[in-house]
């Protein structure tokens, strides 16, 4: 019995309606506000009334009934407050994604050949807007951010704090990591960071608008390393020669071409996919497609359900109320029996 009580107390989770404790002094308040009860005069005088006065006003009955009634009221208030216990811990499963985003910050990303909200913007601004919207929908996912130009840098590791990832992305500028493009080094750094993740959760999404012009690791060699480490690489070719627009009737041409063949070969070698985006709308469609890719069943934080426990104090209050009324019932029965005799 003691062990059960200790276990029940250990799982106590509080009360749902704590304001019900305000009802505790209600009986005292009612007794204080109501006028005092007056003793009624004798309606019938009988010669054996003295013998009934003793049993009817038994010395121990009234205090005991008062204590039982008070305890019953306390238990009733406890039940009204809805005490709750914590149930057995359960670990729900949900689908999430873990991916590393690699964003090109080379000098060509400053080309103003994109339209965003009917306004001409550079490629990096368009990519930031689309990726920020993509991150906004990543509830429960772990995302990291890698940037590259002439060199590759890890800005944020895989994390659930996607607000921090968006802030780091917002603060990036074209040319921050150098004016050239080191595709192979970016893939190599991503493989190094992702190899510690469980197999099946090593995903890289790489966005670039140029060709490999820097670095020590060729892109195809980096793809071989990624395939050996079971890292899937999804490549996005953004902008390029087909990504121009007209500004006040004057055509604005895009800069250098994107090396689509290399990006496609990297994706195929690692089991990923290649995407082509010539404007912000196509890029948004690609990231929407990534929403449906790479789901992983992960365990969420353990959850202990709250179980209602008001039945126990309510049952106790009912038992005490019955016990408080039992002496009065026996007394009335005794009087009737004496009168009949």
Image (cartoon, rainbow, N blue to C red):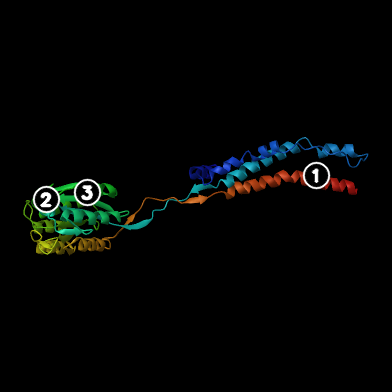
Q: Is residue 110 visible?
A: yes
Q: For the view shown, which residue lies furthest in the right direction?
A: 47
Q: Are marks 2 and 1 in contact (CB under 8 Å)?
A: no
- Please report whichever mark, 3 or 1, sits nearer to the chain's N-terminal start: 3
What residue would you read off at disc 3?
170
Mark 2 lies on a secondary structure that is loop
- Please report whichever mark, 3 or 2, sits nearer to the chain's N-terminal start: 2
Query: What percent of the width, then of the height, locates residue 57?
Result: 80, 37
Label 3 crowd bin: few (<14), some (14–19), many (20+), radius 10 Å: some
What residue would you read off at disc 2?
149
Q: Which of 300/167 is in front? A: 167
Mark 3 lies on a secondary structure that is helix
Mark 1 lies on a secondary structure that is helix
Q: CA distance from mark 2 to mark 1?
A: 97 Å
Query: What percent of the width, then of the height, locates residue 339?
Result: 89, 47
Query: What percent of the width, then of the height, locates residue 97?
Result: 28, 57
Q: Is residue 196 visible?
A: no
What residue would you read off at disc 1?
331
């Amino acid at each position: 019995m003691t062990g059960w009580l200790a276990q029940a107390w250990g799982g106590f989770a509080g009360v749902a309606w704590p304001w019900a404790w305000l009802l505790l002094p209600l009986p005292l308040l009612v007794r204080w506000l109501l006028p005092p009860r007056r003793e009624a005069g004798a309606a019938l005088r009988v010669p054996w009334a003295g013998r009934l006065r003793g049993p009817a006003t038994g010395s121990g009955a009234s205090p005991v009934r008062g204590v039982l009634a008070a305890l019953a009221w306390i238990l009733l208030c406890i039940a009204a407050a809805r005490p709750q216990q914590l149930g057995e811990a359960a670990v729900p499963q949900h689908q999430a994604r873990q991916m590393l985003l690699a964003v090109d910050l080379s000098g060509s990303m400053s080309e103003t050949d994109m339209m965003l909200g009917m306004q001409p913007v550079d490629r990096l601004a368009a990519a930031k807007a689309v990726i920020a919207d993509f991150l906004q929908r990543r509830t429960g996912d772990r995302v990291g951010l890698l940037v590259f130009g002439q060199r590759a840098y890890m800005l944020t590791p895989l994390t659930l704090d996607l607000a921090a990832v968006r802030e780091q992305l917002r603060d990036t500028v074209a040319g921050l990591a150098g004016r050239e493009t080191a595709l192979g080094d970016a893939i190599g750094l991503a493989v190094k960071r992702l190899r510690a993740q469980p197999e099946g959760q090593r995903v890289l999404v790489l966005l670039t608008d140029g060709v490999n012009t820097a670095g020590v690791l060729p892109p195809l060699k980096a793809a071989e390393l990624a395939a050996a480490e079971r890292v899937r690489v999804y490549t996005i070719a953004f902008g390029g020669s087909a990504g121009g627009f007209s500004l006040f009737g004057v055509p604005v041409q895009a800069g250098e071409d994107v090396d689509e063949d290399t990006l496609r070969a990297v994706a195929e070698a690692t089991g990923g996919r290649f995407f082509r985006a010539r404007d912000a709308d196509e890029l948004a469609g690609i990231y929407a497609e990534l929403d449906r890719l790479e789901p992983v069943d992960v365990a969420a934080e353990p959850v202990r359900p709250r179980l209602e426990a008001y039945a126990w104090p309510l049952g106790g209050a009912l038992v005490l109320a019955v016990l408080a009324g039992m002496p009065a019932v026996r007394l009335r029965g005794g009087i009737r029996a004496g009168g009949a005799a």
